[in-house]
Amino acid sequence: MRADLRRARVTAKGLVCPLHRWHFNHLGSCDHVPGGAPEELTSAHCLKVFPVSERHGRAFLFAGAGAATLPFFEGENPDEFISARAWGLRGNNHWSVASANGFDLAHFEYVHQRKPLQIHSADFSQPDRCRLTLSYRIKPSTYADRWLVKRFGDAATLDYQVYHGNLVVARTRIGAFENRLMSFVRPEGDERFSAALFVFTPRSGSLWDLPKNLLAGFGTFRFFTHECEELRGVTIDPQRLGAHEGLLKDYFQWLEAHRSQRNPSSAGIGESQRWQTKASSTPVMTSHT
C-alpha cells in the first residue's frame, strides 16, 4: 500500500510500519502482522535492506548493489577524530560536476591559484574508486591563503578519492596543517545537487576539540560555497574534452564504466547516489507495505 516508512517507529528489533503496525526485522523480513500470520507473506512483502555504517552520530547508507564498507582516510582510525556536524551545500549543476571538479587542474591553477608541481598518481583502474594524488604550490590571492602560507608555507599535497561517483574523500596537507574532508553528493534532478560536507579534526580530549572542528568546518564550507557560485550553470560534455583535459576525460570514462557495470542497460552518466547519510536516529530500511 506504499506506506511512508520514513515515519516508521524504530525499535530494538527493527521497524514498525505506521499504517498497519507490521514489524520488520534487520533482514527486511516481516516477523509480526497484527491479526495475521507472517508465514503467509511472500518475498514481495519484504523490505530491501542496505549496508549501513554509524559514525560520529550519523548513519551512512550504501544504496548500490552488493556490499560496501564506508571508507576513511588511509592509515587513520575514525575513533581518533571528531566531526561535529554536517555542512549542507546546494549547487546548480549536474551532480557529476561536483565530484569531477577535483580533476580539473586548469580550474585548480588559474582560479584557485594552486599550481600543480607533480602528479604522483592518477588511478582509474579500480571499479568502485578512483584516486588522484599531487603536489602543488599556493600562490596566495585571498586573506585565508595569505594566512595559510605565512603560517605553514606554500608547499602542499592533495589526496583526492571518489567512491562510486558521489562520495569524495579528500586530504590536503600544507606543511603541518591538514584538512580532512568527506563529501556526499546527492542528485536533485538534472541540473541541481546537494552535498553534505564532513570535516574531521584530531580528537585530543580537550575542550577545544569542538571549537576547532567547527572553525575548520566553517572555513571549508565557505570555500565550497564560493566554489558552487563559481560553477553555477557549468556543464561538462565528456565528448568535447580535449587532450589538455586528460584527467577530466579519464574521470568521466571511469564514471561511465562504473555505471555501466552496475547497470549494463544504462546509457550516459545519469544519476548516482550510492552513498547517502542521515542522522543516526533516522530509519534506513526503506520500502513500502
Image (tube, rainbow, N blue to C red):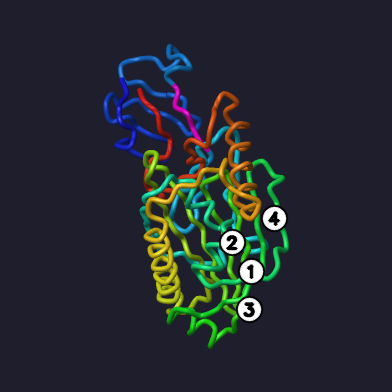
Q: Would you say residue 49 sits in the magenta stretch? A: yes
Quote the CA–CA distance across marks 2 and 3. 16 Å
Contact check, label 2 and label 1, Cβ < 8 Å: yes
Quote the CA–CA distance across marks 3 and 4. 20 Å
Determine crowd level at label 4: few under 14, some 14-19, many 20+ residues with C-alpha closer than 10 A.
some
Nearer-the-camera pick, 35 or 284: 284
Contact check, label 2 and label 3, Cβ < 8 Å: no
Q: Residue at x 32, y 35 (%)?
A: 8
Residue under pointer 2: 105
Q: Say the numbered circle drawn on residue 116.
A: 1
Determine crowd level at label 1: few under 14, some 14-19, many 20+ residues with C-alpha closer than 10 A.
some
Q: Residue 161: name its quadrant.
A: bottom right
Q: Would you say residue 225 sits in the magenta stretch? A: no
Q: Amino acid at mark 4?
A: Ala
Q: Amino acid at mark 2?
A: Leu
Q: What stretch of residues is rendered in magenta?
A: 46-50
Q: Is residue 151 left or right of residue 8?
A: right
Q: Residue at x 67, y 62 (%)?
A: 133
Q: Secondary structure at mark 1?
A: strand
Q: Amino acid at mark 3?
A: Ala
Q: Residue 175: x percent and y percent?
A: 62, 80
Tell which tag, 2 or 3, sits nearer the viewer. Answer: 2
Q: Residue at x 44, y 27 (%)?
A: 47
Q: Residue at x 58, y 47 (%)?
A: 241
**Nearer the N terminus, badge 2 or badge 3?**
2
Q: Residue 4: x percent and y percent?
A: 30, 31
Q: Residue 135: x percent and y percent?
A: 66, 70
Determine crowd level at label 2: few under 14, some 14-19, many 20+ residues with C-alpha closer than 10 A.
some
Residue under pointer 3: 155
**Nearer the N terminus, badge 3 or badge 1?**
1
**Nearer the N terminus, badge 1 or badge 4?**
1
